Image (cartoon, grey):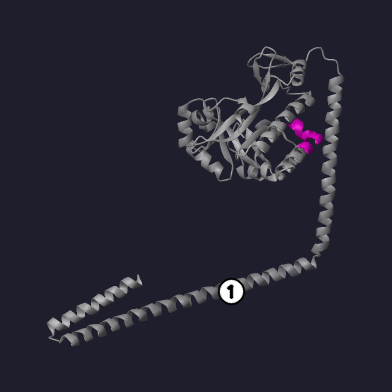
Amino acid sequence: MAALVYIFIILFGIAFSFGVYFALGFTVVEAMLGGAIAGILAVVVYERKLRHRAEGRLEKGIEELSSLLSTDAKAGQMLSKRMNKMADEKVAERLEVMEADFSVLGTVVRQVAEAVAQVEETQEKITQNTPIKKRNIVDENLKKLVSISDVKKALREKRVSFYAQPIVNLPQRNVVAYDLTCKMKKANEEIIDAKDFIPVSGNVAIVREIEQIGFKTAFEFNEKTKKPLLFYIPISKTSLSDNDMLNWIIAQLDKSREKAKNIIFNIDQEQWEAFNSIEKVKLASLVDKGANISISNVSSLRQNFAQLRDTGVTSILADAEVFIDSPQKYSDFEGGDVANYIHRYNIDLLVHNVKNEQQVLTLLEDGVKFIRGEHIAPPSLASEVIEF
């Protein structure tokens, strides 16, 4: 800007020289001298204005600095008074008391957790020793019967495996994660889902054995893969309530904190809401080791996402059909605003059960970044689809 002003001053000086030469009859030398003098006067006037403006800014800056210093001085006085008051209240002694209280609280929590585990183990032994004529799990939708003995036999014959379904990003559709789910191959080679054979009550030993297979699968692939992939793996109250299982999981996460952040424990919303304080503390111990949490099968997106984020939740799963066709069941926002709102809290909205390309396009327009479903890729044996 200053260069432009000086260019105009030079042009003014030249114009002045031509003016006095032709209009007043000055000689060439006199006209050039007059133009130079006019240019110098213009420069002097311009520099004077600049100086006055700079002085004004300097005075204003000094006033603001003085105000800030005054405010800092007042804040220092208040801080000094508070420090003196805290010193008078013997903060050091109070901190020692608080540390002792926290130590006692930690001991109590550990003892309660051990007591709960002992109760569950006792209940398991009683259940196993109680004669039962038939113990069947009935799938209400498919009306299939799978006995506990069949499940135990399938475990012995290694017919219980974990399948991986790719999760892709939009719009690129690159695989960024795998959702690991349990399936069982029956004697007739039929493949059935976890909900058709995993007992919902009792037989906690079977549930833990199945979930441990999933944990081993997730940890193994997480260790071997060279790509930055996430692994979603289900976890239930049954595994969290067992101290040996919990300590084993923590030990696996401790092997590599860098790799631990790739493990996302997937928890059904009903179980998440049913967790007691002890189970929440145990889940927090997994988050402290670097793992993350995902909430699945949500019935609503009207959640306290700030609180979820503080507990280690990094993603939440919603159904594609409900999200697109009946968004009012999930949220008071429009579909296009929900994903952006959730993302403000560093939580990803993962939409699953995507069945066709039109749903993909709608989700892309709504700002959804991660999807999975039969239309994208069906679940396959983890060892067959995960690349190293």
> Is 39 left or right of 333, judged from the image as shown?
left
> Is 171 left or right of 295, judged from the image as shown?
left
Residue at point 70% right, 71% down? Answer: 80
Q: Residue 207, relative to residue 132: is it above or below?
A: below
Residue 312, image x and y in percent? 66, 43
Q: Secondary structure at mark 1?
A: helix
Residue at point 17% right, 79% down? Answer: 18
Identify the image quadrant of the N terminus: bottom left
Residue 277 visible in the picture? no
Magenta stretch containing residue 237, yes or no?
A: yes
Q: Quadrant of residue 191?
A: top right
Q: Quadrant of residue 142?
A: top right
Q: What's the amino acid at mark 1?
A: Leu
Q: Quadrant of residue 166?
A: top right
Circle 1 residue: 69
Q: Nearer the viewer, residue 55 or 371?
A: 371
Magenta stretch containing residue 208, yes or no?
A: no
Residue at point 79% right, 68% down? Answer: 88
Q: Residue 28, relative to residue 215: is it above or below?
A: below
Residue 194, image x and y in percent? 68, 23
Mark 1, residues whose alpha carbon is within 10 Å: few (<14), some, or many (≥20)?
few
Principal secondary structure, stretch drawn in magenta: helix
> Is 143 left or right of 9, judged from the image as shown?
right
Residue 321, image x and y in percent? 52, 27
> Is 259 left or right of 347, judged from the image as shown?
right
Residue 286, image x and y in percent? 72, 41
The magenta segment is 236-248
Figure label count: 1
